[in-house]
Image (cartoon, rainbow, N blue to C red):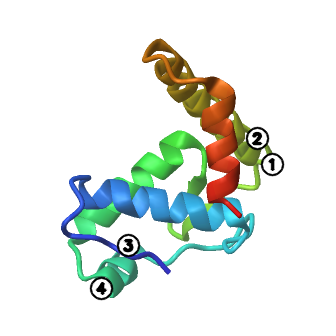
Amino acid sequence: MINLDYRDSRPIYEQIVEGMKKLILKGVLLPDEQLPSVRSLAMDLSTNPNTVQKSYAELERQGYIYTVKGRGNFVSGDRDLRELMKREIIGSIGTLLKEAADLGFDRSEILSELEDSND
């Protein structure tokens, strides 16, 4: 489900957050589906339950999940999450293209190379 890379410079909780976001955005985890308990996921990932709890808190803060007291954590049914993520990605790409232009790289050349690398 989620792969942790202990050589990655990002903290474990951020890797869990990113992994869960990908599963939610890809539709692997459906709206209102219950997530594994903190303890269960911590055991599966061989990590501390506090790390998983921190990840769940961040996912809730970002709107990807919600908590029902006494029942657990569930995937948010908000359809705007995909659109929000799409806008974030487009913003990041725009920033990178601007940086490339500032360094003298031709925008169309970069976009062409990106297209070629995805074939």
Q: Residue at x 59, y 54 (%)?
A: 66
Q: Secondary structure at mark 2?
A: helix
Depth-wise, is mark 4 or mark 3 nearer the camera?
Answer: 4
Determine whether, in the image, residue 35 is placed left or right of residue 87. Answer: left
Instruction: Name the residue tied to disc 3.
Output: 38
Identify the amino acid type marked 4: Met
Residue type (three-letter) at the residue carrying disc 1: Arg
* Amino acid type, residue under disc 2 in the picture: Glu
Tell which of 55 and 7 is nearer to you: 7
Find residue 69 and report its horizontal and vertical position in percent: 52, 60
Q: CA distance from mark 4 to mark 3?
A: 9 Å
* Circle nearer the N terminus (3, 1): 3
Q: Is residue 43 left or right of residue 93?
A: left
Find the residue positioned furthest to the top: 102
Report x, y in % for residue 24. 64, 63
Q: Is residue 79 visible?
A: yes
Closer to viewer: mark 2 or mark 1: 2
Q: Residues within 10 Å of mark 4 (few under 14, many from 20)?
A: few
User: Which residue in the protein does label 1 denote?
Assistant: 79
